[in-house]
C-alpha cells in the first residue's frame, strides 16, 4: 500500500487591486458577506483531498488574513506569508516554505491557486490530486467558446489579423495548477539561471525548462471565474448572493435522535404546513419543541413582545434554546400603486420585521448553545416581478439577512441559514388550487426533513435548495452548479409555457394572505453553489419572469 503523500494548497494572494481601482487588495474585498479570500480558503478547508493550506499574501496585509483565518476557524491554514514582487517570486517563496523540514527524497503534492478564484469546485481539486498520482504536473483549463485571433500592430493603422488558430485545440487556463513539489522546485531552479526568465503562470515554467515532463490537463469549470476587472467584482457579488447549496445528506434515525435528544427547538409559524412538520419531526426524535402560530397559540410574529415572550417561555421551561425556526409569512398579490398602506405595512411586518424580531430576541439564547437560526425564502428572491413587489423584495431581504447574520454572529458560534424549497403540497395550497397532478409537488414532510438536516449541519450563511428531483437527469455527470442551473432553466421554461397556455390562476382565484407557515409553495430559481459567468447572469435576468410565480401565491 502506497504511503500517503501530503497535499498542500498554496493560495496566491499577492494582487494589489489596482486594476479594480481599489485601495486594498481585491482578495480582501467582501462579497456576499465574506472576503473573497475567505470564500476561497473555505473551499480548501472543506476539501477532503487537501491536508493543509499555505497563503502568500500581499506585503503589509498578512495580519488581515490571519484575523480572517482565526475568526472563520480555518484550521487547515498553517501559515500566512508575504508574497514576492511578482507571481514568480511569490511561487518561489511558497516552494521555499514547503521545502523546509522535508526529509531527503520526501515528496509533497502542491496546488497553486489564485485567491481571487473563489468559485473553485471540489471536483477540480479532487481530479488534480488524483492526476498527481500519475503525472508530475497538472493544469486546469476549459475549451474556448470564442474564436481566438492572433494580431500584429502596424503603427498608427492599428491591429491586423495574422492568424486564426484552430479553436478545437485552444483552451483557457485556470487554476489550480498542481505539481509534485520536486518537479516545480527543479523547474524554478533551472529558470533562475536564465537572465531573461519571466512567466505569468507556473505550468509555463515547467513547459519551458522541463520540456520532457508532460503536463496533464484537468477540465475546469466555466464558473471558476477570476475577480480581476471591476465588472468581475459586481458579477461575483451578485452570483454569490444568488448562490445556493444542496441540502446535506440525510442522517439515519439514530443520528437524528442522538443530535436532538435534550435539545430545545422553537418554531414560529408552526400551526400547519412546513412549520408543523418540522416541529413534529423534531419532537419525534426527542427534542423539546415549542411551536407557535397565530391560529394555535395566538402568537403574532410581527409583535416583538410576543416573540420575546415565546422564546423566554421555552428557555424558562428547558434552560436552553438550540434551534429557532421561522416559517411564518404572508403574500399579497397586486400592483404596488394600488395597494393600500395597511396591506403594505402588514407584508413588511410579517415577512421582514418579524424575522428581525425573532433574530434579535433569539440571539442571546443561541449564543449560549452555539445554536442555529433557520429562515425560509422563495425563488422570487432572485428577481422582483410585477404583482409581487412586496413579497419578492422581502424574500430577497431574508437572503441578505441570512448572509449578514451568519457573518455577524460567526464569532458567537451561531449558524444562520435559509431554506429555499420548490412548490410544496400543503393544506392551504390545496384549498387555493385544488388537487394537482401527483408527483408535481414537494411534500411538506420532505422539506421538514431537509430543514432538520440543515439544522444539524455545520453550514452557515447558505441558501439551501430543496428540490423534488434532480432536473439534470444525470447526477453523476453534473456539478451542483450545473444541476441548479438546469433546474432554473427547466422550471422557468415549463412555468412560462404554462402561463402562455392560460394556466395562470385568474385574479379572483388568487388566495388571500396567510401568516402561518413558510414558503410551502415556493419555487426554486436556484443558481447553484458556484455561479459565475456572464452568460449565467443573463439567464438569471431573463428567465425570472412573473410566470415563475403562477403556482406560488400561497405561503402555507
Image (cartoon, rainbow, N blue to C red):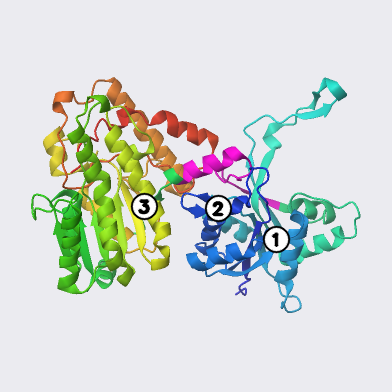
Observer-nearest of 405 and 91: 405
Observer-nearest of 413 and 142: 413
Q: What stretch of residues is rendered in magenta?
A: 216-240
According to the image, label 3 marks what residue? 402
According to the image, label 2 marks what residue? 36
Query: Can residue 434 be seen by looking at this rendering?
Result: no
- Which quadrant does the N terminus fall into? bottom right
The kind of secondary structure element at disc 2 is helix
Query: Can residue 420 be seen by looking at this rendering?
Result: yes
Q: Position of residue 517 (x, y in %)?
A: 19, 48
Question: What's the residue at 19%, 30% (across, down)?
Answer: 340
Observer-nearest of 257 and 83: 83
According to the image, label 1 marks what residue? 59
Q: In front: mark 2 or mark 1?
A: 1
Q: Is residue 154 magenta?
A: no
Mark 3 → mark 2, Cα distance in angstroms: 18 Å
Question: What's the residue at 59%, 50% (across, down)?
Answer: 117
Amino acid at each position: 500500500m502506497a504511503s500517503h503523500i501530503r497535499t498542500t494548497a498554496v493560495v496566491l494572494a499577492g494582487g494589489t487591486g489596482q486594476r479594480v481601482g481599489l485601495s486594498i487588495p481585491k482578495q480582501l474585498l467582501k462579497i456576499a458577506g465574506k472576503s473573497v479570500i475567505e470564500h476561497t480558503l473555505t473551499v480548501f478547508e472543506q476539501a477532503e483531498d487537501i491536508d493543509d493550506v499555505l497563503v502568500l499574501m500581499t506585503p503589509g496585509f498578512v495580519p488581515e488574513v490571519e484575523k480572517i483565518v482565526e475568526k472563520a476557524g480555518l484550521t487547515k491554514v498553517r501559515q500566512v506569508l508575504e508574497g514576492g514582487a511578482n507571481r514568480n517570486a511569490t511561487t518561489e517563496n511558497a516552494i521555499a516554505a514547503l521545502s523546509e523540514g522535508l526529509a531527503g527524497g520526501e515528496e509533497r503534492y502542491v496546488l497553486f491557486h489564485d485567491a481571487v478564484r473563489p468559485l473553485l469546485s471540489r471536483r477540480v481539486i479532487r481530479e488534480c490530486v488524483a492526476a498527481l498520482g500519475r503525472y508530475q504536473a497538472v493544469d486546469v483549463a476549459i475549451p474556448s467558446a470564442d474564436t481566438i485571433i492572433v494580431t500584429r500592430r502596424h503603427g498608427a493603422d492599428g491591429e491586423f489579423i495574422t492568424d486564426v488558430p484552430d479553436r478545437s485545440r485552444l483552451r483557457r487556463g485556470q487554476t489550480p495548477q498542481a505539481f509534485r513539489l520536486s518537479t516545480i522546485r527543479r523547474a524554478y531552479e533551472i529558470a533562475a539561471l536564465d537572465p531573461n526568465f519571466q512567466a505569468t503562470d507556473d505550468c509555463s515554467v515547467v513547459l519551458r525548462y522541463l520540456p520532457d515532463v508532460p503536463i496533464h490537463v484537468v477540465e475546469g469549470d466555466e464558473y471558476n471565474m477570476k475577480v480581476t476587472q471591476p465588472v468581475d467584482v459586481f458579477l461575483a457579488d451578485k452570483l454569490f448572493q444568488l448562490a445556493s447549496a444542496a441540502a446535506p445528506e440525510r442522517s439515519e434515525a439514530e443520528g437524528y435522535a442522538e443530535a436532538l435528544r435534550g435539545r430545545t427547538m422553537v418554531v414560529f409559524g408552526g400551526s400547519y404546513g412546513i412549520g408543523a412538520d418540522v416541529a413534529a419531526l423534531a419532537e419525534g426524535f426527542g427534542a423539546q419543541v415549542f411551536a407557535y402560530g397565530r391560529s394555535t397559540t395566538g402568537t403574532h410574529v410581527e409583535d416583538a413582545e410576543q416573540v420575546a415572550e415565546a422564546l423566554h417561555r421555552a428557555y424558562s421551561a428547558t434552560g436552553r434554546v438550540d434551534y429557532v425556526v421561522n416559517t411564518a409569512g404572508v403574500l399579497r398579490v397586486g400592483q404596488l400603486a394600488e395597494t393600500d398602506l395597511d396591506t403594505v405595512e402588514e407584508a413588511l411586518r410579517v415577512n421582514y420585521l418579524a424575522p428581525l424580531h425573532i433574530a434579535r430576541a433569539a440571539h442571546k439564547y443561541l449564543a449560549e448553545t452555539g445554536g442555529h437560526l433557520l429562515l425560509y425564502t422563495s425563488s422570487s428572491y432572485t428577481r422582483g416581478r410585477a404583482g409581487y413587489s412586496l413579497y419578492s423584495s422581502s424574500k430577497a431581504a431574508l437572503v441578505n439577512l441570512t448572509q449578514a447574520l451568519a457573518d455577524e454572529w460567526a464569532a458567537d458560534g451561531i449558524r444562520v441559514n435559509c431554506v429555499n424549497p420548490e412548490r410544496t403540497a400543503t393544506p392551504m395550497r390545496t384549498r387555493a388550487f385544488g388537487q394537482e397532478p401527483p408527483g408535481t409537488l414537494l411534500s411538506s414532510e420532505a422539506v421538514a426533513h431537509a430543514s432538520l438536516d440543515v439544522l444539524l449541519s455545520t453550514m452557515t450563511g447558505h441558501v439551501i435548495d430543496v428540490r423534488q428531483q434532480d432536473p439534470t437527469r444525470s447526477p453523476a455527470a453534473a456539478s451542483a452548479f450545473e444541476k441548479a442551473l438546469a433546474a432554473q432553466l427547466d422550471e422557468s421554461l415549463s412555468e412560462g409555457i404554462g402561463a402562455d397556455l392560460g394556466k395562470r390562476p385568474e385574479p379572483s382565484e388568487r388566495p388571500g394572505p396567510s401568516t402561518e407557515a413558510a414558503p410551502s409553495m415556493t419555487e426554486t430559481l436556484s443558481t447553484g453553489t458556484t455561479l459565475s459567468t456572464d452568460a449565467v447572469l443573463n439567464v438569471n435576468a431573463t428567465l425570472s419572469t412573473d410566470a415563475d410565480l403562477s403556482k406560488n401565491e400561497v405561503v402555507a
